[in-house]
Amino acid sequence: MLGAPLAPARTAITRTAYWTRLLPLLAALACVTRIPSFVPTLWNPDEGYLAVEARLLAQGGQLYDTVVDRKPPLLPWLYEAAFALCGSGSLLPLRILAVLAQLLTAVLLASVARRHWGERAGRTAGVLYLLVSVGLNPEDAQAATFEVFILPWTAAALWCADRGRWGAAGAAVAAAFLTKQTGGAVLLPVLWPLCRRGAVRAGLPRLAAGFAAPVLGAALLTDPAGFLFWTVTGSAAYASVTGSGLHVLGRALANAAILAAASAGLLPPIARALRDGRARAGEPWPWLWLWLGSSAVAVAAGCHFFGHYYLQLVPPLALLATAALHVLPDKRRLAAVLASGCACALFVAWGLLAPRPELAHAERLAAALAHRTAPGDRVLVWGIHPETYWLAGRTPATRYLTAGLLTNYSGGRDGSRVGEAYAVPGAWPVFRRELTAHAPALIADDSRGEPYAPARLPTLRRLLTTRYTEIARVDGAILYARAAASPGAGP
């Protein structure tokens, strides 16, 4: 009897020792794999968009009203909070948070793997995930944007569901959805253990309440109608499958091939498990396949197939490979880690050495805007690089930070469905009113021959020809200043 209480203490000591050894390894690996993220000022327009949003929110803007985006509010709020604490001149705080997000994801996956297959499997899952997590074009894998911050929430949802913590699982699903809509796809694998354990009657209400409370809270903190419109109902043209099939297929295959190359150590053991039949039956194989399948649906949603979408596939792939490797000899596990490590080194080198011509262009254009305008002036950058506003330190003349929202350029993929007719519903009347109320001191036409050029847009073309005059060209972009005869006139 005297020895009985010692068992929990020994278990706690063992658990503490395990994580004491593993956490420093995963933390170091998370930092090393994301070294490239700290090199450029920005990685892609999504970071620029979020940075401009955060500044506008800090100046009193209202999300889904005077500040708009097709994304849920969690990440704009995170950027705003980081800027409030550390200043808005650098994305360094967000880079650090992205490292922590990747570390947390790895820890949660390691915990799930350890619970099912033992301590060695936990180490394998965490390491494999971090090695493969940078296996895409660096502008997709290294940026501090939506998918990177989805991943810890999706892993947390699975971790909670695996332990029957249904309310917490629902809250994690909600947080993933509030980071980006496709994060909600993790709900399907969360429901699997709920049904398998016969806990639907007791667990489903807790799961639903855990999900509903954060989503309703976010809607009420913003504007419920605007929240619904911008995150769900207002993007029909953007999500339409109509477009260039070959263009979409090429992008999908290219990004899939890049991720497959990064997963060179993961795919062979998964394929072997499928061939041997181990991946078709038994717990938790169906659960992991459902997670991978739901993530694939999230990648395909809207038929855009941007590289960063593929990050949602990495956590289930890491766990599937771990499940396959834990019954194989140690040399197979070592081979998988080495192959993943070599691929990771190549992708890290790519991130460090790849040129950033679009960033250089945005910096030159931002310098020209800053030189020709005063800090209090409003400007309009007609293009798909909202980071120009942030780099120049100038306030946008409109809530629509890219030409995409007014022309559906990104949603049109190759330009087949681009124009005023494909804009976000109701956007052009608002755009005209804003340019009347806040006539930009300078307009930069940064279309550079793309399908959203002003020549193809009657409203913008009329504004430029009647109210503005060309004053300079910068790196292919055309700068227009207000004509002296009609200062402040609207379009």
Image (spheres, rainbow, N blue to C red):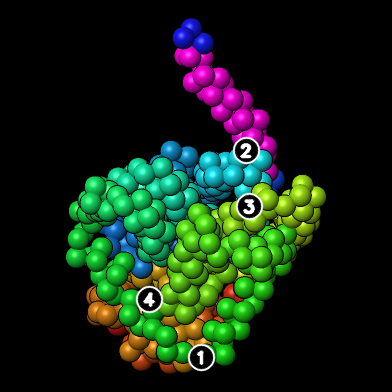
Q: Position of residue 428 (x, y in %)?
A: 29, 81
Q: Position of residue 74 (x, y in %)?
A: 37, 53
Numbered disc 2: secondary structure = helix
Residue at image mark 2: 119
Mark 2 to mark 4 CA distance (whole Å):
49 Å
- The residue shown at (25%, 79%) is 426
Give the crowd class for mark 2: few <14, some 14-19, many >=20 residues within 10 Å.
some
Q: Is residue 291 above or below residue 74?
A: below
Residue at image mark 1: 244
Q: Position of residue 304 (x, y in %)?
A: 49, 77
Numbered disc 4: secondary structure = helix
The kind of secondary structure the magenta stretch mainly shows is: helix
Name the N-terminal-most of marks 2 and 1. Answer: 2
Give the crowd class for mark 4: few <14, some 14-19, many >=20 residues within 10 Å.
many
- The residue shown at (53%, 41%) is 115
Image quadrant in which you'd find residue 356 = bottom right
Residue at image mark 3: 322
Residues shaded magenta = 4-30
* Disc number lying in front (1 or 3): 3
Mark 1 to mark 3 CA distance (whole Å):
38 Å
Label of residue 405 in the image: 4
